[in-house]
Every structure is written in C-alpha cells, then in structure tokens.
Image: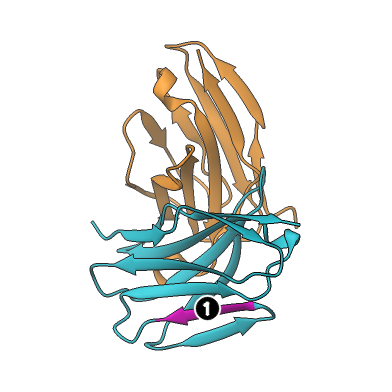
Amino acid sequence: NAGVTQTPKFQVLKTGQSMTLQCAQDMNHEYMSWYRQDPGMGLRLIHYSVGAGITDQGEVPNGYNVSRSTTEDFPLRLLSAAPSQTSVYFCASSYEGRNNSPLHFGNGTRLTVT
Amino acid sequence: GQQVMQIPQYQHVQEGEDFTTYCNSSTTLSNIQWYKQRPGGHPVFLIQLVKSGEVKKQKRLTFQFGEAKKNSSLHITATQTTDVGTYFCVSSNTGKLIFGQGTTLQVKP
C-alpha cells in the first residue's frame, strides 16, 4: 500500500491564481482531512470528510473548497490564492473518524503564494 | 469549540535528561491522541488514551490521561538525540480532530 499520497510536493502561485492540491489514499479509509501548518501554530483543520459525498468545515475553512466524490480521493481547491495561504498542507486519513482511529498523514505540500 | 493547550512550546534538554509535555483542556475529553513530527516530516501517531487515569508506556515514553479526562502528559525518560521533534496532543470534537500547538523538543548531545 502507498498509504496517503499528496501531490505536488512544492508549488509556487501568484496572488489570485487557483489550484488543486491532490490527496489519495489506498487504505479504504472513511475519514479524510486537510490541515495547514504554520510556524508556531501547530496544525489547523481546514476541511474534513467522514465518507464519500460528505464534507464539513474545520477550524480555518475560508478560501478553500473540498469535495469527496470517491472514498480514495479528497482534493483541496484554492479558488483565488492569497499570500496568507502560504503554508505547508497535510492530508490525513483514518479508518473511522468518529471513533478517533489514528490519522495517517501524507508527506505534505509546501505552498508559497507571492 | 473544544481546544487543548499544550505547554511548554519549546524545550531544550541535555541528552540523558528527562522531558515532559502537558496537554490541558477546559472540557472533558472523550480520548486523546499523541503524535510526533520529526523536522521536515509529517506527524506520526504514537498512542491513544481513552480511560480515566490511563497510563501507557512505550519504551522510554510514558503517556498519562488525567482522572478527570481534562489533561494528559507525555514523559520521556533519558532523552536521546532521536527524540528530537515536535510532539502534539490531539483531541476530538464532534468528528473533528484538533491539534494542540505542539511542544518542540531539542536535545543537545
């Protein structure tokens, strides 16, 4: 199993551009989530999904959209990038979010918005 | 919403010294998870505590869950350079898994 795969690893955007961060897992996990990590602020939850067709907002959802059309994929979309979205983004999945199964993380995407 | 406060934010120790990080909540937690993130890496699951007063050990690491389920701690005995990284506690809130701010441990050889 590949686990949780995130692409790309690095991305530079200009203010106002849009892009999609990809996340895929091959563990048949129900729960998937996106976090951003900024220095001194830990990981903050952006959006999460408890199963295909279901998404919900986390702590910092503004400026981001998600969808969950399949169990395997959970892309994160930035519609109009802003410098404040410069961060490291992590996708994570778990067997079942409600029972707080351990999170499995991807390797992260380092995004810079200029 | 439910939040956990983690202290200290940073800790520098000499190799061989002990280290403890604390996680505190104003509300009762259903359970708590601990993760470690090495520099440049991603968080990796260490353990989950569920029961009041629970104590679990992993080699030199000891995890505790308070009797009131409002606090937790991670203690490392005789730190080694391989213990370097940031340690996070994670609590759940209606399906959301929320991270504490983390404690970054540096170990001087």
Q: Residue at x 61, y 23 (%)?
A: A11
Q: Mark 1: few, some, or many residues within 10 Å (few <14, many ≥20)?
A: many
Residue sitting nearer the eye, B57 or B77: B77
Determine if residue A81 is in view: no
Q: Residue at x 64, y 40 (%)?
A: A6
Chain identifier, cyan in the render: B
Compared to residue B17, the image places residue B99 above or below, namely above
In-image side of B29 versus A35 (left or right): left
In-image side of A79 versus A25 (left or right): left
Q: Residue at x 23, y 70 (%)?
A: B27
- x and y, in percent, of residue A17 in the image: 47, 13
Q: Which residues are magenta?
A: B61-65
The majority secondary structure of the magenta stretch comes to strand
Compared to residue B57, the image places residue B79 above or below, namely above
Shade representing chain A: orange
Q: Amino acid at mark 1?
A: Phe
- x and y, in percent, of residue A39 in the image: 49, 38
Image quarter (top left, top right, bottom left or bottom right) of the N terminus of chain A: bottom right
Q: Residue at x 50, y 87 (%)?
A: B55
Residue sitting nearer the eye, B38 or B44: B38
Q: What residue sits right under mark 1 in the picture?
A: B63
Say whether residue A113 is magenta: no
